[in-house]
Amino acid sequence: MTTSPSIDSILKDQSLDDQARSIAEKVKAGERISEDEGLYLFEHGTLGYLGALANYMREKKHGHKTFFNRNFHIEPTNICLYTCTFCSYSRLIKKREEGWEYTMDEIMDIVKEYDDQPVTEVHIVGGVLPQYDVPFYSELFQQIRAHRPDLHIKALTPVEYHYIFKKAKISYEEGMKQMKEAGLDSMPGGGAEIFHPEIRDKIAGGKCSGEQWLRIHEIWHELGMRSNATMLYGHIEEFRHRVHHLEELRKLQDKTGGFQTFIPLKFRNENNEMSHVPESTVVEDLRNYAISRIYLDNFDHIKAYWPMIGREVAQLSLSFGVDDIDGTIDDTTKIYSMAGAEEQTPAMSTRELVNLIRNVGRQPIERDTLYKEMTDFTDHVFEEDEQFKGYVSLPVVKNN
Ligand code: SF4
């Protein structure tokens, strides 16, 4: 089931202007759109039109398949040296006692809490502080690897890597090699924000630049490893900055092929220095998913992070190019809830997530981090559903 019109009905629409028609024809023919065309879509693409194009690409790549994985998050600290204006972490450095700074043992205790859970991945990311350095993370990855060898370690972004390698006086190449040897399996997509310096310097000054972010991913891909990418949108950037961001990712992906998934992240305005900036509308969120799908023709997957946008919008997004919904996470992640995300305690059972996907006519597939398909839940019957005995039989009331 899709809420978007088909691409053929869009092409039959006589009122379509020349540029919109030419872009739709390109998408139908599997051709790549240009930067100017990307900008045109952001400036003029209507929701129905964009949904039709994005859904066409999504179904061509994946049919109705909608992926999810079972993971858990660990945030070693919620205090950070940097002062990104959109982030609710950095203000805590002044009131350090209000935050947390886990030790190695405390982090390992969290890992062990999941020993009996059918999770396949641990996602580790948090603030930047000096005690979390190359020796700390190398030791942590080794300990997790030794404790649970099959758990995929997806950890840290170029923001942390740039900082810790600089502190250790080692090159990005040497640093990433050491991380791989310690047990790192893949890199999440965070820290990308907006690459263009006109915006990055204002919202994320001091941390790694757009070029450095891209370079660290490139080196990681050259080691034969995979990673994801994000874009923080809907704040002070203009559409041209989003196009620039997508173009930089598409270029690197052409070169390395190492990205798996693109995750657009909606800016939320609570508890940060940008509370005066209004948030994007749901329509803009869906347009942004759709244009990301259309523009990034060389990315396999577009992911919606459901705790950030809420469950209903996540369902809608499946008709706007999204084919992946971030997993059955529990409330161990505070990054978005602190910034005012839709879900303050983001937890969803596998049954809930599967039903969320099935209820919009899509096919729920559990995957591992590298998109190996593990279980097709399309016709799966959960024990809880089996226990449901149908309608309660009521006494028949006869009207004489
Ligand atoms: S976005 Fe990341 S680097 Fe910036 S202040 Fe927040 S935790 Fe630190």
Image (cartoon, helix red, strand yellow):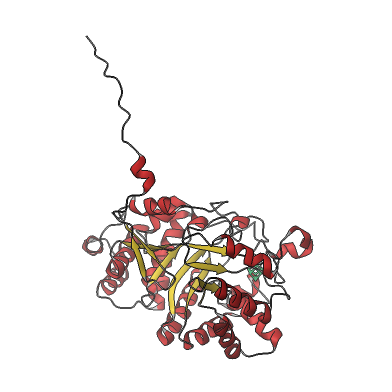
> Which one is nearer the viewer's eye here, 230 or 396?
396
| In the image, residue 309 above or below residue 153 | above
Assign the C terminus to one quadrant of the image. top left
Q: Quadrant of residue 215?
A: bottom right
**Residue 312 shown left or right of residue 143 in the figure:** left
Quadrant housing residue 257 = bottom left
Q: Residue at point 34% right, 61% down?
A: 51
Q: Nearer the viewer, residue 158 or 73?
A: 73
Can the viewer see residue 335?
yes
- On the image, the x and y values in percent for residue 114 come to 54, 61
Quadrant where ligand 1 appears: bottom right
The residue lying at 68 percent from left, 85 percent from top is 166
Can residue 188 be seen in the rendering of this structure? no
Q: Reply above or below: 369 against 281.
A: below
The quadrant the N terminus occupies is bottom left
Identify which residue, 296 or 215, lies in the foreground.
215
Horizontal and vertical percent for residue 318?
37, 59
* Residue 178 place in picture, x, y as percent: 59, 86
Q: Residue at point 53% right, 73% down?
A: 153
